[in-house]
Every structure is written in structure tokens, then in C-alpha cells.
Amino acid sequence: MTLAMSIETNQLQQLKPLSVPNRLLLGPGPCNAHPTVLQAMSTTPLGHLDPAFLQIMDEIQSLLRYAWQTDNPHTIAVSGTGSAAMEATIANSVEPGDVMLIGVAGYFGNRLVDMAGRYGADVRTISKPWGQNFSIEELRAAMAEHRPKILGLVHAETSTGCRQPIDGVGELCREYDCLLLLDTVTSLGGVPIHLDKWGVDLAYSCSQKGLGCAPGASPFTMSPRAMAKLLARKTKVPNWYLDMLLLGKYWGAERMYHHTAPINLYYGLREALRLVSEEGIDNSWARHQANVEYLWSSLESIGLKMHVEKQYRLPTLTTVCIPDGVDGKAVAKQLLTEHNIEVGGGLGELAGKVWRVGLMGYNSRKESVDRLIAALTQVI
């Protein structure tokens, strides 16, 4: 053993049991998991093909359909973060040469562009300034120009705090024989979503935001229209791990081994979704809206302004303009180190211009707002 290895081994042997600070997570995610969810995740694991665990998987599917307001048979949780579920929508719907039109008005619209290009799509974009959204007229004009096979939109743009209206977009996509793909990462559980009513064909989300769970088990759904396109592919899905034809055999009646699922994360997701169901999805949406309006009025009372026009702001994430002369990073650091409160900074075009304040899942409570405002008042 070398001297360096000996020193490192000595240091490792002196490590104490894990201890982490108790933070209030009011950034863009993760949020604090509900205590019931944390308790569920500490339960002893089962085998990934144990009948008791397969029953939990069935329950997750039913609960996800409820939260998304869809009857899609193929509704599962991807074993990975929200970005894995995001990539799954692209991997299963895009074949080389397919024209995909993507609405870009923030960081995650750009991520869709990057992913689609990697899978060989002929990517076209329609763009707006960060913090704005697309009108149905703008989308219609772009559809007429590009005639895409897939339209990708971000329902809740995590980088800007802006909500994209979806009413009428599904009908537009059917008019052009096009699939509608929707990012609901920062909207599921906290923002009204009606996938079937809207005519959404592919959607993905995450577990650590509006659902109030830990990251790592990410919702994915596809409509019968999207499944028909998948079944008609001329080439295999190029991502084995995210191939829904293979995953469907694990989540479906065949129960064929595909991978070892993150058992305890699925426990947590099941409990998080059960809590949403227990509260009622309409009540969850209403709670998020009421608490974010309290946040907005409280921020305005200490002289802060919001980046997004009020009618398009998200109930789950607010972009707060950093006042002139204020060091945004220094404020965020002080909130974390002195008050144990995390807020996010801006991404891309909004870097250094906004704080991103998440109020979602278990953290969507007035107590969270009061604690943040008291700390901000001291720090600023």
C-alpha cells in the first residue's frame, strides 16, 4: 500500500456516521419530502419481482393516472431522475429524420432540443424570450411551416417560472397528424394538468417537486397514439434502458425482468402519490395556488418584484427579480449558511438576474413563506 493510500484509508476509518444539515428546500427542487414518504423509504426492501412489490408498482400506475388525469395504459415510473424520463419520451418517439418542433423559452426547452438532436431528429424550433410563452396562433403558424411529427413543449419551465397554456394544442396536433410531448416536471401535483382532455401523447415528470418525494423515480406516460408510433418503428429504440417495449413487459402483465428497480424510492413515490390522492388533486392544486399567492404578496411587501406576468406564473416556482445593487449569490449563500434555507439562482439568460423560489409538495405551506420572508428581510 502506498503512503497516499494509507493516509486516505486512515481518514476513511475516522469518518463518523452520516449527519446532514436540516434545510428548508425552497429552490427549484428537490423540496423536502413529506415525513410519511421518508418513513416509507426506510422500510425494508423487497425483491423487484416479489408479488408484494409488483402490487406496489400497480398502485403507482393507478395513482399516476389520477395525478395526471389520464387513462393511458402505459403509465409508469422510470428508474432514474426526471431527465431520464425526459429522454425516454424522445428515445421512444423519435426516429432518425423525424421533424420535431420544439418550443424554446427557457433552459429546458433547449435541453429537449439537445436530446432530440442526439436521437437523429430534424429539429426545428420556435422561440420566445425567457419568461414568456407561445400563443395558439404562434404554434399554428409554426406547425404549418414545419409540419412536424412531434411537437415538444414545456408546460412548466423550471428556469423561468412560466406556465405554457395547453388548451387547444392537442387539437392542433391532431389536425397536423403530430404527437404532442409535454414536460410536466415542475407542474405534476401542483399545477392543473388534464393530459387526456388536452390531447397530450407523451409526458414526463419527476418525483422530488410537486409530489414531495425524493428524486430517482420519475413518472412517464404515453398515449395509444404514441404507442402506435412506437410499434411502427423501423428501427429499435436506440436506448435499451429506456425502451418502453421492454419496460412494458416489466410493468405489464408479463412481469418480465428488465432491471432491478430502486425499491425504496418506489415505496416513497407510492406514498407521495397516495397523499396526493388522499388530499384530492383539485385540493392539491388549490393549496399550491393559495400559498404561492401568499408568497407573491409577501415578497411584494418587502419591495421585491416577480419576473413573469402574473397570469402565467407557476404555483410551484417563482422567479424573483434580484434588486439592483444586490449580490444575488451572496444572499442565497447567507440564506443557506445562516438560516438553513435554500433558494435557487437563475439559469442561462436569467443567471444573476433572478432567484428561483420553489413552493411545492410538502413545502407548499404558509409557514415556509413566513420563514423565508423573515430571513430575506434580515439578509437583504
Image (tube, rainbow, N blue to C red):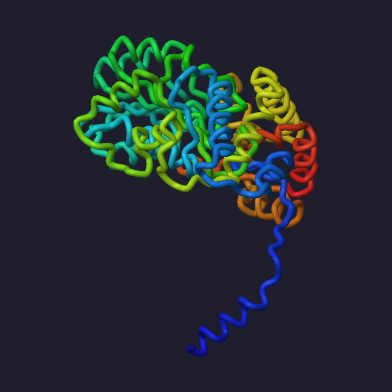
Whether 32 is drawn above or below 135: the answer is: below
- Tell me: 136 left or right of 160: left
Which residue does the image show at 67% across and 45% down from the upper left? 25
Q: Is residue 129 visible?
A: no
Whether 124 is drawn above or below 159: the answer is: above
- Tell me: 248 left or right of 266: left
- Tell me: 346 left or right of 358: left
Whether 143 is drawn above or below 294: the answer is: above
Residue 39: % across, % down: 72, 44
Residue 125: % across, % down: 31, 29
Closer-to-camera residue (170/63) = 63
Q: Is residue 297 visible?
A: yes
- Tell me: 2 left or right of 291: left
Residue 141: % across, % down: 31, 15
Closer-to-camera residue (166/194) = 194
Residue 104: % across, % down: 39, 31
Which residue does the image show at 40% across and 38% down from the upper left? 256
Taking the view exactly as shown, the residue that stands out farthest to the front is 51
Which residue does the image show at 34% across and 15% down from the upper left? 173
Which residue does the image show at 49% across and 26% down from the upper left? 155
State how many labels appear.
0
Whether 79 is drawn above or below 228: the answer is: below
- Residue 145: image quadrant is top left
- Residue 149: image quadrant is top left
